Image: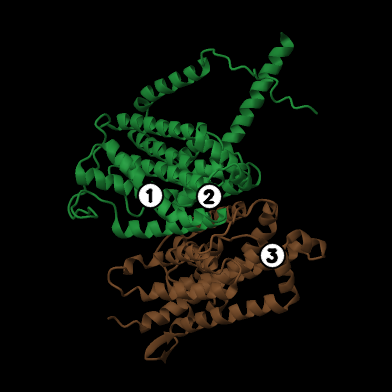
Amino acid sequence: MTDRSLEGVSLVASSRLPLREIAVGASALAALYFLPSYLSDYWLRVLISVAALVVASLSVSVLFAQLGMVSLAQYGLLGVGGWFALRMSHGTGAPFELALLTGGAAAALVGLVVGLPALRMRGLYLAIITLMMAGAIQVLISAFGFPDGGAGILGKSTGARVMMARPFLAQSDPAYFRYAVVIAAICYLLVLAHLRGRPGRAWAMIRRGEVCALAGGVHIVAYKVWAFALAGFLAGIAGGLLAGGVGQLDGSAFPASQSIMLFALTIVGGAYSWFGPIIAGLMLRAFPALLNEFHVDGNIATMVFGVGLLHALMTAPQGIAGQLADAFRSVSKLVKGNGGTTA
Amino acid sequence: MPDFTPFLVSGLALAATYVLSAVGIVVLYRASGVVNFAQGAVGALAAFISWSIVERGGPESLSWLAGVTVATLVSLAYGRLIAPRLVSTDPITRAVATLSFALILLGFMGYLWGEGPRRLRLPTDTMSFELLGVRVTLTRAIAFGLGVSVTAIVMLFLAHSRMGLQMRALASNRELSAMLGVRVFRIDGWAWVISGVLAGVSGVLLADLQRLSGQTLTFAVIPAIAAAVIGRFASLPATVAGALAIGVCEALLTPVPVIGPFRSATPFIFAVGAMLWMQRKPVFVYR
């Protein structure tokens, strides 16, 4: 049987206007402009954390889809990023963007220092060491708490808790929601730039086979470290976004189980697709909020997520995003097929 | 300088629960190639079941037996129903699948029992004896005794019994052992049973020594995994030594002023140290 996969594709790059992409982008912008006015305050807050967690899930999916690396500490790194962003914002009164970048850089650095010994070993060890890292971060964060405007290195205030200053452009909730979505889009572009560039090619080669990549002159450990740092950076940005959305962070909100949940949902959502992290973000925050509205116990969500992960691992490695894409493809094939017979 | 002796005693008991859990993890990994992140969650299930039997006025001695039995059955069910479907995948996927098992158990326990300040009481808590001027409860002594004896039994079992031989055969090559007539799934099942029993016993003891909470007990797998890392998932003596060191260090740090609150990060430090030690010689370990 001959390979017909290229038959429908023109081999010459056509220079037509990318109308579909422009239409999608424009409708997304319009939705972004009009959506907040239709939402209640509660759901607006929920969607702000969804935007932050989409970035967090993106960080997990970069590692898993590109290099098959399993990091179970990304939610902990979210806490690290949030901590540094809050400290920077309270301590120096720096603009929000600078605090966000500090959080990202700090999380990347912490992730690197801890991940380095495991990055040089087999993949399983990275999963193990990051699980322990998630546990250790939980201990540190619940012991130190998050800065809330006080003095000293830890920045704990004894009196009233000060809220983190929001960005100059986005003081209100609707504006901050738009801001968070734009930041998430920038993070997507950052990942896309990596995939299109040199690191993406190196990652693809490592994915094919480490020995082959080694023979091709790819420095395996360096590119794994790069991916891990990028993922840490994204997690830190997500932490900063979350801190800005709520104004402060709760020391008990970063248990190791959240990191596992984040990983599980990224796989369930679909790590190999750009749409997967969005599904994961929605499931992490919007699904429990929905259950909450119907007064269903949140532990049910945990069980459902566990079953979902098992299902994804056994039968649907592409996750929900992959299944949606398959369904979309078969529907469009059906529509096109019918059009062909009537014409 | 605070008096460390009472902490040494409680540390040895705590370490014994880590030993039980870690031995279960290593035995399971050696036989079936699965790193079981759900070891702690299975133990927590055992503890919760014994707690609710005692709460309803059931017999105490039977309650923990029931807990361990249920833990064993749950572990075996996972090993027979789910693990075989993932045999052909890579080790990471198999390990991650046990995470989903842990999530399911965690959600189930949270739904049924919730998180509250609880402790499992064993009848042996009230009996005690003096040793080196420290009061030692019988539970602690039993925990330590179990830790030592179980390790010895498992090591003898692996080294001298026929099934132990078959387990070691599975560990080195699954396909070849199947060709030589080892009944792979049956041996696998027994490995899951051993792991379930050890998880259950460790969970019941830990719920008595520390506290009964789904989250805490589920993540008590972290020190056990750290110990297994020290033993490279292969050597039982190194694993036991690692678990003892982690448990004792954790307990001894309790009265130390500044670093006391961070003592639960001990397993992490040990595991990172072990990984760095394994890399002291440049070796090419590629997947």
Q: Amino acid at mark 1?
A: Leu
Q: Give the answer, above or below, for where A15 lies relative to A84.
A: above
Colour applied to chain A: green
Q: Residues within 10 Å of mark 3 (few under 14, many from 20)?
A: some
Between B126 and B268, the residue placed more toward the observer is B268
Q: Determine the residue positioned at 64% across, 76% down.
A: B154
Distance between mark 2 and mark 1 Cα atoms: 18 Å
Q: Tag 1 or tag 2, which sits nearer the N-term?
A: 2
- The quarter of the picture where the N terminus of chain A appears is top right
Q: What residue is shown with label 2?
A: A70
Label 2 resides on the chain identified as A
Q: CB under 8 Å between callouts 2 and 3?
A: no
Q: What residue is shown with label 3?
A: B171
Element marked by disc 2: loop
Can I make out residue B71 in this image? yes
Colour applied to chain B: brown
How is the structure coloured here? by chain
Q: What residue is shown with label 1?
A: A109
Please state the horizontal and vertical placement of residue B35, each as a whole percent of the image.
Answer: 59, 60
For discs 2 and 1, the disc positioned in front in the rendered view: 1
